[in-house]
Amino acid sequence: MKIKQLFTIFLISTSLMVTAQTDVTEKSGVMIESRSKYDFDKTVDLLSQSIVEKGWKVTTIHDLQETMKKNSKEVLPVKVIELCNPGHAYQILSKDTQRDVTPMLPCRVSVYEKADGKTYVSRMNAPAFAGMIGGDAANTMVQAFNETEEMLKSVL
């Protein structure tokens, strides 16, 4: 049974990678980076709206540029958006056997500028991790990832 689940997750993650945007860069299979078609502020605004429209919650937005400025460091704009779907979170939080994956909650998407002046969006490649985790938590992670990818379509 475990092999069947892993194989299914592998097929899902492979199909996601094949159908991904052409402006996508994977880093060691762990992170996915895509270029936004908008500037930094519009990307953050549109993505935040899309999250809410899809029934998710924006729990917080970390302004890392501002945090670094307070520590006398200058960096280009970067914000990390924490988003949560209470239903998905419940699937993981309600079972003791899945609580070990709570460090991955809530989901996070980073929006940042690079020296080329373009805006990028980065997120964790959850299907790659799901295969290592297995079980119901893996299924929830893949479902959340797929929904997040739908939200990102508004800016990619």
Image (cartoon, helix red, strand yellow):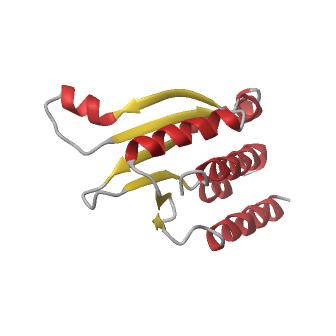
Q: Which residue is drawn at 65% across and 57% down?
A: 127
The answer to whether residue 74 is left or right of residue 90 is left
Query: Residue at 17% across / 28% down in the picture?
Result: 71
Quarter-of-image position of residue 105:
top right
Percent position of residue 73, x then y: 16, 36
Query: Is 133 positioned to the left or the right of 94 in the image?
Result: left
Residue at the image position 27 percent from the left and 30 percent from the top? 66
Q: Nearer the viewer, residue 36 or 136?
A: 36
| Pick the front one: 150 or 133 | 150
Q: Is residue 61 above or below residue 1?
A: above
Which residue is at a point 72% across and 43% down the rendered structure image? 137
Quadrant where the image shows the C terminus? bottom right
- Residue most extreme to the right: 1
Numbered marks: total: 0
Q: Is residue 26 above or below residue 150?
A: below
Please identify the quarter of the rendering in which residue 120 is found: bottom left
Q: Nearer the viewer, residue 3 or 102?
A: 102
Please determine whether, in this image, residue 119 is positioned above or below residue 45.
below
Locate the N terminus and report the quarter of the image it occupies.
bottom right
Can residue 101 be seen by looking at this rendering?
no
In the image shown, does 28 or 48 lie closer to the viewer?
Answer: 48
Looking at the image, residue 18 sits to the left or right of residue 3; the answer is left
Q: Position of residue 87 (x, y in %)?
A: 76, 31
Q: Can residue 87 be seen by looking at this rendering?
A: yes
Q: In this view, does 113 lie to the left or right of 147?
A: left
Q: Estimate the x, y position of residue 17 in percent, counting from the top left.
A: 62, 69
